[in-house]
Image: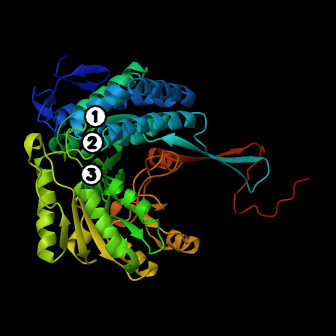
Amino acid sequence: MSLHYLNYIDGEWVPATSGKTFESFNPATGELIGVVPESDAQDVANAVGAAARAFEKWRKTPAPHRAEILHTAADLIRARKQQLGELLTREMGKVLPEALGDVQEAVDMGMYMAGEGRRLNGLLVPSELPNKWAMAVRDPLGVVGIITPWNFPIAVPSWKIFPALVCGNTIVWKPAEDTPVLAIEFVKILEEAGLPPGVLNLVTGYGVPAGEALVQDPRVKLISFTGSNEIGKLIAVQCAQLGKRVSLELGGKNAIIVLDDADVDLATDGIIWSAFGTSGQRCTATSRVIVTPGIHTTLAERIANRAAHLRLGNGLLPTTDVGPLINKNAVTKVHAYSEIGKGEGAQLLVGGDYATEGELARGHFYKPTVFDNVTPKMRLAQEEIFGPSLSILRANSIDDAIQINNSVNFGLSASVYTSNVNQAFEAMRDIATGILYINAGTIGSEVQLPFGGTRGTGNGHREGGGPPVLEVFTEWKSIYVDYSGRLQRAQIDTDILVS
């Protein structure tokens, strides 16, 4: 099997115009996964041109037919779930059960959006004038630029690509440079499903120059970006200057609130899964536990004990609980925060160091880390770490816990463990996040509901599922049909009696 891959532009698999390439490696073992094009502005321009040429025909293709292609793609992904999951683990590092879940989410999104092909609901409302019809329909935007992260290399692209396609847009996709091979396999499936040339184009490469060129191309009507706050803010400024739409899903600093009346065993399970699943490399990962005094000591001890016994290793091995971080820079960043936490006076309960024993030395591993006695103003409690690092904070009451939860510059996901229905509903009312779980962890969204957050987590759009995702990828067109045969003036001809 060849390890050399190509871009996909206008229905053809082509190298970068410069001939440059870069490599993708397994973060657990250092194994070479593939050699892919290092695209530049010319490659992006070629891809955008292909998408622009394909748009007129694609937008006029009936939405139910567009949806049939999505349905076929979802079936193909389902049939190759094991193969794709194993590739995902090898290229990104997450343990195989999680990788298979990542693939399943793409299946779910494909099926859900295929259903929208026979809905794409508009509005039908009464007119204020007689013999006049009033309605609104959805129009596609045109060429959409999609920039996706490495931590969910098939699920997150499916959140964007499937709705964009069913709405009648054409696409240029730049996947994360850490997971390009899986992106290529995803595009091959859509090609096999019957997607016409030019409708979906793939360019692999770095944020600069490839991603930057995609943002700046005036033919691109929308940039849909999931990634870091730093890059997201830069993209937002550039899109504002260019007068184009932008949909951002950025960081999180998610908390699990555990109240005195909670099921401690259940809460511990949820905390361990949410904090250390995907090695903490989820935007919805739990990085804070906010606990009331009655169970603080017990919960902290249980969390530390469970974290200390998590098994690190290659995600393909059934004995592995926690896989590697994505690259060396990620490990360095997590360790820097461990040092910051100790310097701030937080109490290190477990972890806080590199994992380099035996086979782990070949990859990018970091020990699951738990800090106690963290205060709300510490950097550990305010900044996104994006790794297996968990902070435990004290709260005096549910109101205090909610205030601490809402005090960060992120508002993606939160969770509350309680057996008191009144407290659950108080949390549902007052917690300011886009996603909230009661008696479950902070991860595990489903495609039939919107995904996104408040404050610094994004710019108010919702992707990931549910009807609101259509708002990202469509324009509204209001249509009035007057069949009265005479001039009628809205807001002026108000004294109307129909005989």
Is 300 situated left or right of 420 in this image?
A: left
* Mark 1 or 2, closer to the camera: 2
Picture disc at residue 59? none
Q: Label 1 vs label 3: CA separation? A: 14 Å
* Residue identified by numbered label 1: 88
- How far across and how far down the image is residue 120, in percent? 57, 40
* Residue identified by numbered label 2: 94
Q: Label 1 vs label 2: CA separation? A: 8 Å
Quadrant assignment, res 81: top left
* Mark 2 or 3, closer to the camera: 2
* Residue identified by numbered label 3: 281
Q: Residue furthest right?
A: 499
Image height of 149 relative to 429, above or below: above
The earlier-in-sequence mark between 1 and 2 is 1
Image height of 310 relative to 416, above or below: above
- Tag 3 secondary structure: loop
Is 116 situated left or right of 109 in this image?
A: right
Q: Label 2 vs label 3: CA separation? A: 9 Å
Query: Which amino acid, mark 1?
Result: Leu
- Tag 1 secondary structure: helix
CB contact under 8 Å: marks 1 and 2 = yes
CB contact under 8 Å: marks 2 and 3 = yes
Looking at the image, which is closer to me, 419 or 422? 419
